[in-house]
Amino acid sequence: MYTVYLGLGSNLGDRLSNLSRAVEEINGVASIIDVSSIYETEPVEMDSENLFYNMVLGISTPDDPPLLLVKLKKIEKKLGRKARTHLEPRLIDIDILLYRGLAYEDHTVRVPHPALEHRRFALQPLNEIAPTAVHPILEKTIASLLRACRDRHRVVRTEYHIHSSTSH
């Protein structure tokens, strides 16, 4: 079994509901072991006024990165994500941030996420639930990556929290 951290984001429609539905769907394909708070964040590298809600899930899965990616893309599509919304506003975005102890790359997926150490909106919620997890390529903890992160986009923890039933 792998321990994997997923970044979830939404900046269209009912952002909280979009994240909640995504968590529910992910719970159907993996065991959710940890859930971060929800953070309101500025869009990064996209031309949009819409603020994001971002969060991180810790999951346990037997799936390797390519198989997990296929399952996550199906969930995004089911929840209304349109193809080709990279760097555009989106109902839901689910990214594989980190497989604990594993670096992997093929033509479909790179793990850890290639921009993880540059994105405060991913590092801050990840640090909340896994500060001692180690980036397997940089060999630094998430807490140290967050401290060194130069991204100054606004990331503010909200009062919202999604509780997951770990029924898988």
Image: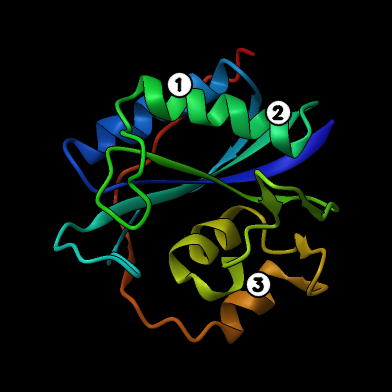
Q: Position of residue 21 (x, y in %)?
A: 36, 24
Residue found at x 47% / y 20%: 25
Please, is residue 100 above or below residue 51 in the view? above
Q: Is residue 26 visible?
A: yes
In space, the residues marked 3 and 2 are separated at their CA atoms by 28 Å
Q: Position of residue 59 (x, y in %)?
A: 66, 34
Q: Is residue 164 visible?
A: no
Residues marked 1 and 2 touching at CB (< 8 Å): no
The part of the image, by quadrant, that contains residue 168 is top right
Q: Secondary structure at mark 2?
A: helix
In space, the residues marked 1 and 2 are separated at their CA atoms by 19 Å
Tag of residue 150: none
Q: Which residue is mark 1?
A: 24
Amino acid marked by disc 3: Ala
Which of the two marks, 3 or 2, is nearer to us in this view?
2
Left or right: 9 with respect to 60?
left
Residue found at x 18% / y 62%: 48
Residues marked 3 and 1 touching at CB (< 8 Å): no
In space, the residues marked 3 and 1 are separated at their CA atoms by 28 Å
Q: Which residue is mark 2?
A: 67
Q: Earlier in the sequence, mark 3 or mark 2?
A: 2
Amino acid marked by disc 1: Glu
Q: Earlier in the sequence, mark 3 or mark 1?
A: 1
Please, is residue 24 above or below residue 9 in the view? above
